[in-house]
Each structure stands twice: as C-alpha cells, then as structure tokens.
Image (cartoon, grey):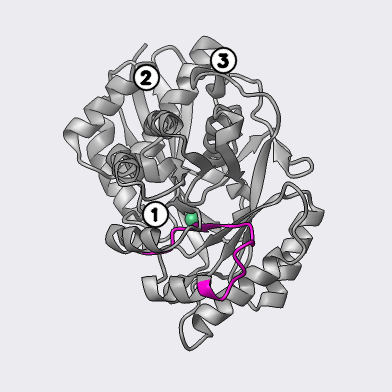
Amino acid sequence: MKITAIDVHAVHLPYAGGVYRLSGGREYHGFDATIIRMETDTGLEGWGESTPFGASYIAAHAQGVHAALDELAPTILGMDPRLTDRVNDRMDMVMKGQNAAKTALDVALWDITGKAHDLPVVDLLGGRVDGPIPVISSIGGDTPEAMRQSVAAHRKQGFRGHSIKIGASETEGGPRLDAERIKACLADQVDGEWFLADANGGLTVEHALRMLALLPSDLDFVLEAPCATWAETMTLRQKTSRPILLDELVENDGDIIHAIRHDICDGVGIKISKQGGLTASRRQRDICRAAGLVMSIQDTVGSEIAFSAILHMAQSVPRHLLRCALDTRAMVNLKTAAFDAPIIDGGVSAPQTSGLGITPDRAVLGSPVATYR
Ligand SMILES: [Mg+2]
C-alpha cells in the first residue's frame, strides 16, 4: 500500500464558551484547525487533525502547521502508511520538532492502518481496556462561587474529574484568590471525584507556595503545570508534598525521561498534537507506564477528529494509570465529522468500527487549501 495524495483543509473552530481565559492574561475566542485527508493506492483514505491552542499555549500555531506540512507531506508520498514508525522516522529526518504538523499526518496513518486491518485504532495501540473513559470538565478562572457552581453543574452531567484553572495575577487577587477558588471547587467533593488545579505554567514558586500555605493539607487535589520552567518546577517540587502533574513542559520522549530521572512529577498530560501524534503518544504512554506515572489523555483543543484520536489512545491506557480524557468536542461549536461516541454519565467509549470511526463532513471542510500528490 502506498500514500498517493494528501489534502490539507483549514477550518476555524469558534470556542464554545465565548472567551477562554488562561493565566497571564491570555484570551482565546476560537482556534484554527488543520485537517488532513490521506489517500492510498488501495482506495482507503485516512483523516487526521491538528488544532493548536492559539499561538501562546505551546510553541505551535496554525500557520506554522501549514508551512511545515508544505515541506513534510511530499516526503512521505509513496510510503506505506501502515509502517507508522518508519513514516515518523522519515518526518523526523526531514524536519526537527513541529509536532503539531506531524500529528495531522500521523493520525491519518493510524486511521488507514485500522481500516486496512478492520480494527479500531485502540486495538492497534495494544487493545481496548474495558469500561467507559471518564472525561474531565474544564472550569475556567472566575470568582470562587461561580467556579463552585460550574463544578456542581458538571457534576450533575456525570463528570467526576474537574480541571480548575488558577493563576490569578496579584491585582486580581493573587495566591489568596487561587486558594479560595480551589477551596470553593472542592467544597462539595463526592466519592470518586478527582480535581486538578491547573495553572498552565502561570505561577512563580513564591505564588505557588503562598497559595499552598493557605490551603488545608487534607484537600484532595493535584497541582498541574504550576510553573513555566523546569528549574522553577524542580524548586517547587522540593518544597511541597502536593502531587504534581506536568503538561506544557512535556512535549517529547526526552521531556518525560527528564521528569522521571529527576523525580519532578507524579503524572503527565499526554496531548496528542503536543506529543507529535499517536505514534509518539503510544511510546510516551509506555514510558509513563514503566515509571508508574498517571496519565491524562488530551489534546490542545480540536473537533471530532482530534477527539477520536484522544479516545482511542485513552481507551488503551491501563485503568489504574488513566485519570481522564478531555472531550475537545465540548470546547468548540463546529462539528467537522460524525463520531458515534456519546458521553453517558461522564464516561465515553471508543467505537468498535475500524480506524478512528469518524465520517468527516465534506461540506464543513470545504475545498482543500493545499494538495500534494
Ligand atoms: Mg493543562
């Protein structure tokens, strides 16, 4: 089997909640998705998506994805898409980094390989772990009471994992406001509920330590991505017993090995396009597994196609190491594909159909902005 053509589609995904706010005054209204259709000489085709979270979340942005694809796509034409590691080796040989661009192509390889073997992608990744995957809510930074109500509303919908955004500037209320937010969100915690306080790298060590000092030690939550740098995170790690999950700092195998060698975290956020696709995420899942790190399987953002890749990966993670998956579909209000994976009582299961199990909506995708053949 050979890759014979690659189409690139560009779609704007409006953010479903109006304005998404992160620490440091970052605001997002929508996201530019890049969607790939990969064609083969057998008639099988595969799809992949890469949607960076604007340009200020990690070092990736949509225009960069298009520029990188322009160099990458021609170099894998003629290769066998089922040889996923070899195609990735080729991409890594011709271009360093640029995980977001490589992801769109890599996910399409897995979609085709699943269809070729008549297996869902989860089974190619090692096999399905039975039972629905818990999805996590995303509680944007707000007043403590508004955040408490948002947690309650998500709890009613069945969510048992909650990601609380923190990182208030000193003028907004600083560590004291962040501590109040965490206390408010955990005030009605029920059995089986799990909380992340996610700063998206927005805290100084001083801010984090002041915030933690204001919180009772028996509150049950994990601190996610507290600081922007490895050095700050290592300093904080030495000064707190609070579990730490890393996200933005971990973009490749070497980052995870660094975190393990220096015992910097207890868990990792695996985001498919941040890590470089399903091929890289599978390898990093196994490194995490060997080290006993818990995993939260996500993507930066995205539509149905991105979520299908998340879900197949999450469904392959041993359950004691899987904290949650992120349903990116809930973050945007444009549907790019049919994907039969409804959330029932806060849980969702990867479909049994072959490949990713998605049917893209060609009308929504429009004409390709680039084609390589
Ligand atoms: Mg995060």
Q: Which residues are magenta?
A: 213-227
- Location of residue 286 (image quadrant): top left
Nearest the camera: 64 or 286?
A: 286
Give the labeled residue for mark 1. 248
Dot 1 or dot 2: first in sequence order is 2
**Closer to the eye: label 3 or 1:** 1
Query: Which three-letter amino acid code belongs to the residue tagged 2?
Result: Pro
Q: Is the residue under label 1 in contact with that under label 3 (CB below 8 Å)?
A: no
Indicate the position of residue 158 as horizontal and vertical percent values: 78, 48
Q: Between marks 2 and 3, how big is the CA–CA gap?
A: 15 Å
Nearest the camera: 60 or 289?
A: 289
Task: Assign a secondary structure to mark 1.
Answer: loop
**Magenta segment includes 222:** yes
Q: Which mark is residue 81?
A: 2
What is the crowding at mark 2: few (fewer than 14 residues within 10 Å), some, or many (at least 20)?
A: many
What is the crowding at mark 3: few (fewer than 14 residues within 10 Å), some, or many (at least 20)?
A: some
Identify the residue at image location x=30%, y=39%.
Answer: 257
Q: Which mark is residue 154?
A: none
- So how many labels did they put on this image? 3
Identify the residue at image location x=71%, y=74%.
Answer: 146
**Closer to the eye: label 1 or 2:** 1
What is the crowding at mark 1: few (fewer than 14 residues within 10 Å), some, or many (at least 20)?
A: many
Q: Between marks 1 and 2, how big is the CA–CA gap?
A: 29 Å
Q: Between marks 3 and 1, how big is the CA–CA gap?
A: 32 Å
Relative to 141, 250 lies left or right: left
Task: Assign a secondary structure to mark 2.
Answer: loop
Give the labeled residue for mark 3. 119
